Image (cartoon, rainbow, N blue to C red):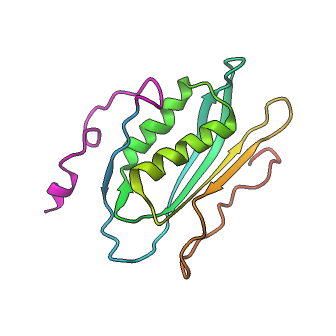
Amino acid sequence: MTEDRYSGLKQLGGNAKQPASPAEAVLERVPAMMNGKHAMVRFTCPEFTSLCPMTGQPDFAHIVIDYIPGEWLVESKSLKLFLTSYRNHGDFHEACTLQIADRLVELLSPVWLRIGAYWYPRGGIPIDVFWQTGTPPEGAWIPPQGVPGYRGRG
C-alpha cells in the first residue's frame, strides 16, 4: 500500500537532473494522510540563490515555507530541485518569492500556506517578502519563522 502512494514519483530514490529553470522544474506531491489534523509543515532554505535580472549578479535569501496540507504534501526532493533551479533564473526578489508560493498553491491546494523570503542586502538594503493564502485554521499551531531582522542575518 505504501509503495502505491509513491509509485508515481520520478525524482525520489534516483539520480534526478538539476532543472535549468523554475519553469522546467517538476514539483511532485504525495498523499498527505493527515487524518483531518491541521499539522503545519515547514521547509527552510537558508541558502536560496537567484540572479538579479538587470546585472546577472547573484541574490541570496533565507526562505521559510509553512503550510497546512489538504490532500497533498510536496515531495521534498522535488522541492529542493525546484528551489535550486532559481540559481539560473533572473527575476526580482518579489517575483521569485511569489512564483514559489504560486507553484506550491497550484500543486497542493493547501489548507493554508505562507512564505517568508528574507533577502540579503544588495546596495545596502535588505528586501523581505511575505505572503500567505489567508487566515490559518483556528487552533493550528503556527510558530514564528524565527528569522531575525537584518543584522548580518546570523
Residue 48 in percent (x, y) is at 59, 38
Instruction: From the viewer's side, name the closer residue of 19 and 62.
Output: 19
Asked which quadrant contains residue 50, the reply is top right
Q: In this view, does 115 lie to the left or right of 72?
A: right
Instruction: From the viewer's side, name the closer residue of 104 and 15.
Output: 104
Residue 32 in percent (x, y) is at 33, 64
Q: Residue at x 61, y 24 (%)?
A: 90
Residue 87 in percent (x, y) is at 55, 27
| Number of disc labels | 0
Furthest residue in direction right, as rendered: 124
Query: For the N terminus, which image quadrant?
Result: bottom left
Asked which quadrant contains residue 144, the reply is bottom right
Q: Which residue is drawn at 44% across and 41% down?
A: 80
Asked which quadrant contains residue 53, the reply is top right
Above or below: residue 1 compared with residue 136: above
Furthest residue in direction top, as rendered: 55
Question: Does 41 appear in magenta?
Answer: no
Above or below: residue 122 compared with residue 139: above
Residue 76 in percent (x, y) is at 39, 49
Q: Which residue is drawn at 64% across and 54% down?
A: 131
Q: Which span is picked out in magenta? A: 1-24
Q: Is residue 8 left or right of residue 98?
A: left
Q: Main secondary structure of the magenta part?
A: loop
Q: Which residue is drawn at 33% across and 51% down?
A: 29
Instruction: From the viewer's side, name the closer residue of 147 and 36.
Output: 36
Q: In this view, does 120 lie to the left or right of 65?
A: right
Above or below: residue 15 compared with residue 148: above
Q: Is residue 46 left or right of residue 107?
A: right
Question: Does 23 appear in magenta?
Answer: yes
